[in-house]
Amino acid sequence: MALHYDGEVKITKINMGPYDNNGYILSCPETNEGVIIDTPAEPEKLLNAIGDIKIKSILITHKHQDHLLGFDEITSKTGAPVGVSTDDVDGLPRPPEVVLKDGDVVKFGNRELQVLVTPGHTEGASCFLIGKHLFSGDTLFPGGPGKTRSPEALKQVIDSITRKLLVLPDDTAVYPGHGADTTIGEARRQYQEFASRQHPADLCGDVSWLES
């Protein structure tokens, strides 16, 4: 469990479950209100990390089941409303209280988090941005995009990444749905190497910016 605090928002990152998932708790330091991002397996790890934070929302980056294995326990224990984007509603164990759209703002305490809908990995995959902290789900990892099921989906996720994520400042921290963090500056540098090369028309699946 890692705690990041830049004076604006407190971020607790919790490694959860058998798939190296990350769950996140964000909190406003003035009011102690917060949000949860994703609900993987081993929900007790995340629940134990909440402490006295008042959870106002649970945000789901996308509908893949490894991000939802702790959904029932985390939602029932916190009682907080769930938000997911329109095109991923169908993958949740139950209908969400809030259907998120691109550009929506989620408030907790004196803080605001912006919704960036970034389809490609799933139809309704979303990222969440607060200040210089981007929670990218499985849209963007260190070294490449999330796995895609078709060449069309790869084109879609690259479009999402280039139009909505790589336009952010270089020093924006990227916190993905699995594994280690990166930065927008590093992601942009690696993507530019990828974009400088020719690729087969059927490229999809696990794509590496530097090796594919």
Image (cartoon, rainbow, N blue to C red):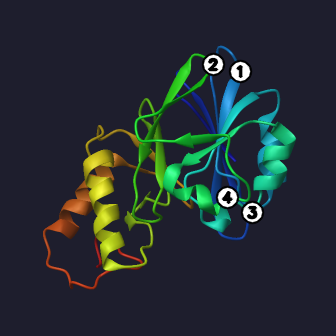
Location of the C terminus (image quadrant): bottom left
How far apart are the two marked residues, 4 and 1, measured between alpha carbons? Answer: 28 Å
Residue 162 x, y percent position in the rendering: 26, 53
How far apart are the two marked residues, 2 and 3, measured between alpha carbons? Answer: 28 Å
Query: Is disc 1 placed on a helix, strand or loop?
Result: loop
Q: Residue 21 falls in which quadrant of the image?
A: bottom right
Query: Is disc 4 placed on a helix, strand or loop?
Result: loop
Foreground: disc 4 or disc 1: 4
**Mark linked to residue 69:** 3
- Against 66, is 186 above or below? above
Q: Which residue is mark 4?
A: 92
Q: Amino acid at mark 4?
A: Leu
**Mark linked to residue 32:** 1
How far apart are the two marked residues, 2 and 1, measured between alpha carbons? Answer: 7 Å
**Can residue 181 be seen in this snapshot?**
no
In the displayed structure image, the side of residue 158 where residue 82 appears, left or right: right
Query: Is disc 3 placed on a helix, strand or loop?
Result: loop
Q: Residue 57 falls in which quadrant of the image?
A: top right
Which residue is at a point 48% across and 56% down the rendered structure image? 125
Circle nearer the N terminus (4, 1): 1
How packed is label 2: few (under 14 Cα within 10 Å), some, or many (20 or more)? Answer: some
Residue 131 x, y percent position in the rendering: 43, 29
- Against 146, is 163 above or below? above
Circle nearer the N terminus (2, 1): 1
Foreground: disc 4 or disc 2: 4
Q: Are marks 2 and 3 in contact (CB under 8 Å)?
A: no
Please state which of residues 39 and 89 is positioned toward the viewer in this rendering.
Answer: 89
Q: Are marks 2 and 1 in contact (CB under 8 Å)?
A: yes
Q: Amino acid at mark 1?
A: Asn
Please state which of residues 192 and 117 is positioned toward the viewer in this rendering.
Answer: 117
Circle nearer the N terminus (2, 3): 3
Q: Which residue is mark 2?
A: 109
